[in-house]
Image: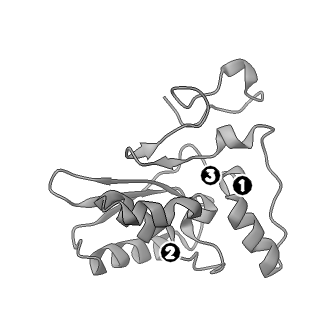
Amino acid sequence: MRATVAAMIDTGDPRARLLALVGELPDPEIPVVTLADLGILRDLTIAADGSPRVVLTPTYSGCPATEAIAAQVRETLQAAGHPDASVELRLAPAWTTDWISEDGRRKLRAYGIAPPGRCSDDAQAMTPRLDERGGNGGSNGSDGHRAAASRPAGRAAFPPP
């Protein structure tokens, strides 16, 4: 995501600008990685009335930093002129270390934390990607879903239909 942040800001697209702004917020527990690096920023939509809604998936359901992250997102969007911004916490599908970006893994290593290995043999297909259209777009095929036959046993396709 970091590679496209500058390009998205330059487009003048309000959603892309806010997505870049929120995506660059540091994780409160490991501030060298961003919300985008961790893959916990799932979506950002703008309602017809202009109010942004951010969807986050915490690294686990009991994560003590979840409320701090949600507050940080709301405060950032309010400071950007959106007092009506909201944050939704989405627990399903559950976050996986496959969602950590390669840039995030590099930052963790440089910080002295060994990044976890990939859980999936096809991590690219399992990694959520926010696209410019306003949602999670897939990079595999026209609809972003992998064929069930290629999915490891016991793993759900992402993004969900």
Which one is closest to the eye, mark 1 or mark 2? 2
Q: Which mark is residue 134?
A: none
In the image, what residue occupies the spot 41% across and 48% down?
132
Q: In the displayed structure, would residue 24 be above or below residue 147?
A: below
Residue, disc 1 = 97
Q: Quadrant of residue 100?
A: bottom right
Residue that lies at the very extreme toward the left in this rendered image: 49
- Mark pair 2, 3: CA separation: 18 Å
Residue, disc 3 = 95
Q: Of the residues shown, which amino acid type is indicated by label 3?
A: Trp
- Mark pair 1, 3: CA separation: 7 Å
In the image, what residue occupies the spot 40% across and 66% down?
9
Q: Of the residues shown, which amino acid type is indicated by label 2?
A: Leu
**Which residue occupies the foreground of this view, 90 or 111?**
111
Q: How is the image coloured?
A: one colour
What is the secondary structure assignment of the residue under circle 2? loop
Q: Quadrant of residue 135?
A: top left
